[in-house]
Image: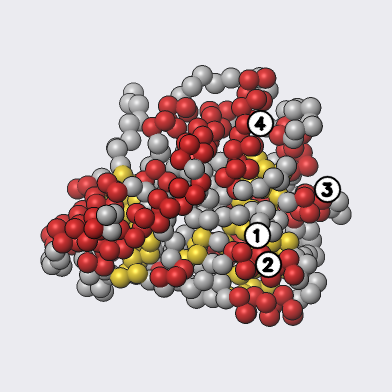
Amino acid sequence: MTDSFHPPVRTLMGPGPSDVNPRILEALSRPTIGHLDPAFIRMMDELKGLLQYAFRTNNDLTIPVSAPGSAGMECVFTNLVEPGDKVIICQNGVFGGRMQENVERCGGTAIMVIDDFGKPVDLDKTEAALKQHPDAIALAFVHSETSTGVRSDAEALCRLANVHDCLAIVDAVTTLAGIQLEVDEWGIDAIYSGTQKCLSCVPGLSPVSFSARAADRIKHRRHKVQSWFLDTNLVMGYWGADAKRSYHHTAPVNSLYALHESLVILQEEGLEKSWQRHRQNHLALVAGLESLGLGFVVEESSRLPQLNAVSFPESIDDGAVRAALLEQYSLEIGAGLGALAGKVWRIGLMGYASNRKNVNFCISGLGNVLNAQGHSCDVSQAVAKAEATYS
Ligand SMILES: *Cc1c(COP(=O)(O)O)cnc(C)c1O
């Protein structure tokens, strides 16, 4: 006989998933009803409105894809890119590389604008690529590069895309609810996010939104969307306001209750307050970790508050520190990814996990582990430095 699975209770301060608010876990356990039940359809309509609030958009085509952030990415590219289309992709981390994969698998051509890991997307290089490729149909970039903790200037990049008559495609998986994002005001045409980062919801859903211009392009495609499951022309038969709400696939009913609850919580706090909270806790973490003698990979002006790429002296054993934190403190922080593997820790302060208690806990846990492994540091001073930023 196999026993029931009871996961350990962790504090999740990595690149996602983040700690889930207990209110959301409670919502998840409410009774399952049919995905065509009138009560469920009413909840779906509220959910669309809540997503429009979080994205700051009036786009009709704003829905959660029934799969994780990577599927939101596929949804955007597979619907917008047809064979032969050219898309300019700015890559400054791991996730930009996945955009290239997506475009090429759709039969498109990816024109890459490459920046170093840890640097924001360069606007001049991007503009040069747009001028050099006037036939490109879209410009795509990652707003919050979770692999490096860098924020790129989404507003300026979207302006460039619009000036050059390109659709602006934005990865906002780690952005949503963590830092400012203005879908309509910035002229974003297609955007996807995830539930398990700054929304602090369970993993497995991907909110997406398409502008009227993008939706029009999808309606008038020359070829059918290659993915049946992600074809928004079909999905909207279930999600669309004017649709007959017919069966497409069985919606992940309980996960959608959870997303609804997480967005209600976001609305209660207020979007701007949520951005401020992420920033305040980030500043406290920076003060404490610098006091421990640790560094930050990203220049101050483009650091993400919700994902901190922290550098450490070469003498420190990366894996041993993370293992000790997990074993002794039940605290998860992230390892480096791609070009930064083994060189940084990625400390997330996302959503529900972005709070003063966690900042304090992470600084003291990390400081104690470093001391135990022979890297002397003053833990109480570091905690005091962090605490001082709150007053
Ligand atoms: C996490 C993440 C993804 C992928 O999301 P999944 O839910 O893991 O599929 C895509 N882009 C960025 C920037 C991310 O941080």
The kind of residue tagged 4 is Asp
Between label 3 and label 1, give the one nearer the viewer: 1
- Callout 2–callout 1 Cβ contact below 8 Å: yes
Residue 147 image position (x, y, % from top left): 46, 62
Give the image quarter of residue 58. top right
| Mark 2 to mark 1 CA distance (whole Å) | 7 Å
Q: Which residue is mark 3?
A: 219
Question: Which residue shows up at 43% across the image and 27% down it?
Answer: 26
Q: Which residue is mark 4?
A: 45
Q: Is residue 364 above or below residue 297?
A: above
The kind of residue tagged 2 is Arg
SS label for mark 4? helix
Residue count near mark 4 (Cα–Cα under 10 Å), binned few <14, some 14–19, many ≥20: some
Q: Which residue is mark 2?
A: 159
The kind of residue tagged 1 is Trp
The kind of residue tagged 3 is Lys
Question: Which residue shows up at 38% across the image and 32% down it?
Answer: 22
Residue 194 image position (x, y, % from top left): 54, 47
Give the image quarter of residue 347. bottom left
| Mark 3 to mark 4 CA distance (whole Å) | 22 Å
Residue count near mark 2 (Cα–Cα under 10 Å), binned few <14, some 14–19, many ≥20: some
